[in-house]
Structure formats: C-alpha cells, structure tokens
C-alpha cells in the first residue's frame, strides 16, 4: 500500500541498493555480468538476509553488474521517479565508487554517471539531489584517502559529503580520520554510518575522529544517556532506517526500535530507506512504520531540513515547503495507514509491521 502524503526528505539511501530486481537483471544481461540469481523471484529470495554480514555479502555479489555511466545515470533517475511519487523533495544519495574502480571502471564514468542522473532528476521531477560517496570500512586507510581526494575533485558536480559504510563490528572509524580530513579540507562534510550494529563508542569515534556532521543510523546512542544529551546539544541529526534495521536483525522487532525513544529525548531524526530494493521498503512504508511507532512526519521532515548538506537557498526552499504542508492531513493519513487512529487497530498495526521481518507483506 502506498501512502503518498506529505513532503519527504531522504538523507540515507544507497543508490546501488535502490535498483529493483527486474532492472538489475536487465543490467546484468546488458553488461554480460553474472548474478547469483536469474529471475526476479530468485533475487527476491536472495534478499532474505540472515544478518548484517549476509546482507553485505549479497550487496557485493549483486551491485557489480552496474558498469557504465549510463547504468549509474539510470539508477539515479529511476529512484528519483520512485521517490518523488512518495513526495520526496530532496535526497542525498550514497554510492561506493571503490568497488567499481577495482573492476576497471574509471572515476569519471562513475561520478559523471551519477551526477548526470542528478541533473536529469531535477529536470524531469523537480527533485533536488546531492551525492555523498561512501568509503567502505574494509578498505585500507590509503584507499579511503583516494576516495576522499576523488570526491573533492568532483565537488562541482553535486558531491557534498563523504560517508563511511560497510561492516561496523571490529571496524572502528578512527583509522579513516585522515580520509575525512582530506574531505573536510575540500569542503565536504562527514556523514558516516555508526551505531547501527556497534554501540555508542562507534558513534563517539565518528563524531570525534571523523568530525561527523550527521550520523547514519546512530540508533545505539539510545544505550548511552550521556551520548543522547550530547547529540541533542550539538544538534546532530540521525538518519534512521527502521525497516533496514529489522531486515539486518540490527533490532529484534519494529516495536523495539529506538526511534521513538530518541525522538522523545529530543534527538533530531530523519527517516530513510537505506537500500529499498534489497529491504523491500520505500519512503511510504517507512513513514507508515514511523506513524505506527508514534513519530510525527513533520518532525522527521524538519530534521531533514536541518541535516541536509545543501546551500542556504535550497535549505530555505525546503523549509518553505515544510511550512506550507498540510501536516495534520498528512499525519491523519499516515495514522490511518498504520492503524494507530484507534488503540485496538494500533496493536494490530505493530504486529503486522513486525511481520514484515519474517517475509509477511506489510499491508
Ligand atoms: Zn546505509
């Protein structure tokens, strides 16, 4: 069920993870790259992740089929169409160039391909997008520095930040401090993942060693009241992805998700899909889940305005869109979709939302 209500800002979406199975299969055929499954059903089955490490393994196995500037452009434009149908007005897209470069693709092909997609998304859908390439935590620190230098080189093509992703357990952020210093010198903000599958120390490392402007996920901050206070005082925005956390078993259930506790404590949280094609989610579903958790769409949007790595005129435009939105109507529609407009229905909504983790379709 689609709930296309209210404007949305998405700050945490991996562009490689937005490609729906049918498109991925077409790209694989076009580029002569094998996939571990040859049908939509087979890929969907492959996307039932046991845990976070299994997800990363499948991510690497499937995303290598994207090879050309045309592929990267198409990925952005396709997702822009999907997200704008859900009301998206601003998106920061993530991509991981290092893996592609290792397979013989040039930096130019990758960065210009994605950036051309961003320009086309603006023309076709009026959707404002920016890009934040990611460093993977399994890279040697010198490779991470090279990604940072390349990201700076393409700054005039909509690159606004540098991220850190991949397996968080046993891969702390500190070794990547130099890469993020290079990015900062080049005018790029630090937007690392942290506090997804590791605890508060990982978030502190991202803040202190990398100078994080925002934290992607950051949900384990809830385990450390002092850290929660620090996030509130510093105005650090967390880019939270509830369905992703459920799919990778980073949370036990949606009912146990830290998002409502963080928001109640005053932490600014934006809402995002992470890898929507792989996690069988979209912006509408995430907002329905947030409503089921009692989190208001307006708060999520305003956190997005605060956290966006855009220029001042764009931020003012996003704030004006928020100020002019019908938030009461939006929230009422989301609450109806979530079943939280009546107490008995709310219990059923949470039960069915948890059910999506075991393969049951959520509405
Ligand atoms: Zn992510």
Image (cartoon, rainbow, N blue to C red):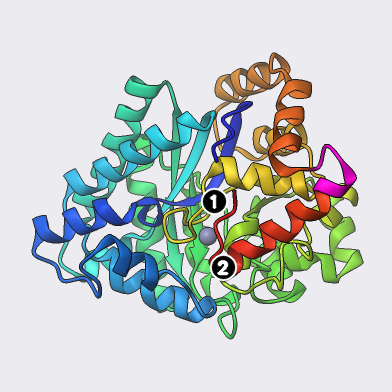
Residue 194: give x, y in percent of width and height.
64, 66
Helix, strand or loop at disc 2? helix
Give the secondary structure at mark 1.
loop
**Lateral position of residue 300 relative to residue 275, left or right:** right
| Residue at (83% x, 65% y) in the render | 222
Task: Check disc 1 and report the residue beneath it.
Answer: 273
Marks 1,2: beta carbons within 8 A: no
For this rendering, which residue is in front, 291 or 107?
Answer: 291
Query: Which is nearer the eye, 328 or 275?
Result: 328
The answer to whether residue 193 is visible is: no
Q: Please, which residue is most extreme toward the bottom here?
A: 170
Identify the residue at image location x=68%, y=58%.
352
- Identified at 50% across, 44% down, the residue is 187
Where 78 sits versus 165, above or below? above
Which residue in the rendered view is the most extreme toward the top? Answer: 324
Magenta part of the chain? 340-345
Residue 15 inside the magenta-drawn segment: no
Left or right of residue 204: residue 43: left
Check the picture and name the quadrant holding the N terminus: top right
Badge 2 local density, few (<14 within 10 Å), some, or many (20+)? many
Q: Position of residue 47 (x, y in %)?
A: 42, 69
Rendered position, 251 above or below 261: below
Above or below: residue 190 compared with residue 321 = below
Inter-mark Cα distance, 1 to 2: 11 Å
Q: Which residue is mark 2?
A: 247
How far from the left and from the top, in percent, is residue 360? 56, 63
User: Counting residues from the N terminus, which is met first, the one under dot 1 or under dot 2?
Assistant: 2
- Asked whether residue 38 is in view, the answer is yes
Position of 133 compared to 341: left or right?
Answer: left
Image spot of residue 251 (x, y percent): 69, 70
């Amino acid at each position: 069920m689609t709930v296309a209500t209210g404007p949305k800002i998405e700050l945490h979406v991996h562009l490689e993870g937005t490609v729906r199975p049918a498109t991925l299969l077409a790209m694989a055929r076009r580029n002569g790259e094998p996939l571990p499954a040859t049908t939509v059903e087979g890929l969907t089955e492959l996307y039932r992740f046991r845990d976070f490490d299994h997800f990363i393994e499948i991510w690497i196995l499937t995303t290598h089929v994207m090879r050309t500037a045309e592929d990267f452009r198409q990925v952005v434009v396709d997702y822009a169409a999907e997200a704008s149908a859900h009301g998206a007005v601003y998106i920061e897209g993530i991509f991981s160039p290092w893996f592609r470069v290792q397979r013989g693709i040039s930096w130019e092909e990758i960065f210009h391909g994605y950036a051309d997609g961003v320009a086309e998304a603006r023309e076709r859908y009026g959707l404002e997008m920016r890009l934040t390439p990611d460093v993977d935590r399994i890279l040697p620190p010198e490779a991470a520095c090279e990604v940072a230098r390349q990201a700076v080189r393409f700054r005039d093509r909509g690159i606004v930040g540098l991220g850190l992703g991949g397996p968080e357990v046993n891969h702390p952020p500190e070794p990547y401090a130099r890469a993020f210093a290079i990015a900062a010198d080049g005018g790029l903000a630090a937007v690392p993942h942290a506090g997804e599958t590791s605890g508060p120390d990982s978030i502190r490392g991202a803040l202190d060693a990398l100078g994080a402007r925002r934290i992607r996920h950051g949900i384990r901050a809830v385990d450390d009241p002092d850290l929660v206070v620090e996030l509130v005082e510093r105005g650090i925005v967390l880019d939270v992805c509830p369905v992703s956390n459920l799919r990778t078993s980073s949370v036990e259930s949606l009912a146990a998700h830290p998002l409502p506790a963080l928001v109640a404590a005053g932490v600014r949280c934006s809402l995002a899909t992470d890898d929507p094609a792989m996690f069988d989610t979209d912006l509408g579903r995430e907002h329905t889940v947030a409503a089921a958790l009692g989190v208001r769409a307006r708060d999520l949007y305003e956190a997005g305005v605060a956290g966006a790595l855009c220029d001042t005129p764009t931020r003012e435009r996003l704030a004006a869109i928020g100020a002019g939105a019908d938030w009461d109507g939006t929230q009422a529609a989301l609450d109806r979709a979530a079943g939280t407009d009546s107490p008995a229905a709310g219990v059923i909504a949470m039960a069915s939302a948890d059910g999506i983790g075991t393969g049951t379709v959520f509405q």
